[in-house]
Image (cartoon, rainbow, N blue to C red):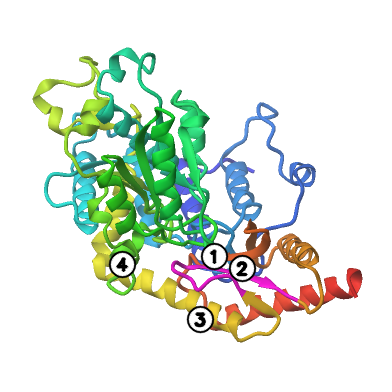
Amino acid sequence: MENIAENDFLKKAFDIALEYLKNRNKKSLVRKNLNPYELLDKFNIELDVKNNNYNDILEILEKSLDYSLNTSHPLFMNQLYGGSNLIAVLGDIFTSILNTSVYTYEVAPLMTLIEKECIKKLGYLIGFGNNFDGTFTAGGSISNMSAMLLAKDKKFPDSKINGLKGTALFSIFVSEQAHYSFLKNSMLLGFGKESIVKIKSDYLGKIDTKELEKSIISEKNKNRIPLMIVGTAGTTINGIFDNIEELNEIAKKNKIWFHVDACYGGSLLFSNLHNNHLKGINNADSVSWNLHKMMGIPLICSALIIKEKKLLENTFSINADYLFHEDSSEYDLGNKSLQCGRRPDAFKLWLTWQIEGKKGFENRVNKLLQKAIIFAKKIQNNNNFILFNYPETPIVCFQFIYPNLSQEKINEINKKIRISIFEEGEIIFNYAEIKNKTILRCVISNPEITEDLIDQIIKTIEKKAHNILIESYL
């Protein structure tokens, strides 16, 4: 077949994308159940086998969509993201077309101003007043890492020059349900795993503040300096919030940096109905917030907001006169970022905000919580299930139960339920271990999920569970 012209190729490629976006909520399968060998057999990924033309690439684009998970489908409930907003997708496309980096105003004048505007709005939502600052990052783990560095440099300013050698040992206090990035970052930053002190949580996953206070005293007795307390605003497994106000009081009493990991739950700040879970966040020293979670902004859209201006520059600025010039230093965002090259990820958020407004964002959050509560109530009213916790975020955690079976067997059944349904590919959710229970975990990320679809999920799980019971346990 004769190769098509470049302009025709682009139109056809966008037609494929538009067709996919138009039908993404209607497809029967969220994923195809193929192991790596089967997928390699159907999709040749080898390079340098032949020179493909535009027609070949169109076919590859169609197959790429077909053989990937449809994360925008209402029945994709496996991760904390999904259900991409169409305007945000458009913003992401234009970001790639621009192909610039927001390290200097010179190469990203408009994108620099847009990022600063987004940081300003996010900081106001947190309640930081007028002296705050922030930066977009490459993800929540990097936001948390940056906050750890800021806390270290604030407490030990000489460490930026001399390193950790000679610096007193210090401790960072996190819930046992905190994100694993804190432990990983402690190794990468040279703090060491022993710098992370895990505090036990209650049954739901909320940090035990009495245990925290005991641990602070214990670490001081070991001649370790308490450096940071981390409050989790939306645990990864079931979306539970730590008591931010109480943690802040403990941090301020002990003169410890207080960081709130609001990567998932931060978006409840848009909602007047649900922002009470984040009461006291305005007193934090730093906040990490992922807008690609819950808000339907394509990956990655992560921000770190800090209460005290200039701390970012103090930690991350470096003399690179070939890149940063004094006359535009206020607008050279690379001076306060861990990265050098960085996409203008704020643009897709800003563009979506232009059409949705804060009210539209609030409606999205409220709708997600409304659907999660409907789901949770259906579980509560069904004798085949037990609800693990009433949802504080759009995560519904529950367990299939059956009389006279041990907890160990109940755990086995729930794991088998998820694996079997996952392999069929029509509904994608996950499972997790918490407090010695295997729970099923559905993350509502697409506000377009209907009550009928929720009923379908529950019926599918019930049917699968009873088949597993008959085959293996009865």
Asked where in the image residue 412 lies, by quadrant, the reply is bottom right
Q: Are marks 1 and 2 in contact (CB under 8 Å)?
A: yes
Residue 367, compared with residue 442, is above or below; it is: below
Residue at the (24%, 24%) spot, across then down? 317
Residue 136, compared with residue 87, is above or below; it is: above
Q: Nearer the viewer, residue 142 or 57?
A: 142
Task: Please name which of the two marks, 4 or 2, marks the residue nearer to the observer.
Answer: 4
Q: Are marks 4 and 2 in contact (CB under 8 Å)?
A: no
Give the residue type at disc 1. Arg
The residue under label 1 is 24
Residue 145, compared with residue 17, is above or below; it is: above
Label annotation for residue 374:
3
Q: Nearer the viewer, residue 116 or 9?
A: 116
Label annotation for residue 471:
none
The C terminus lies in quadrant: bottom right
The residue under label 4 is 275
Q: Pinpoint residue 190: horizontal percent, then vertical percent.
A: 45, 23
Q: Residues within 10 Å of mark 1 (few under 14, many from 20)?
A: some
Q: Earlier in the sequence, mark 4 or mark 1?
A: 1
Element on which disc 1 rests: loop
Residue at the (49%, 26%) spot, across then down? 192
Q: Are marks 4 and 1 in contact (CB under 8 Å)?
A: no
The residue under label 2 is 27
Tell me the magenta residue range. Answer: 387-401
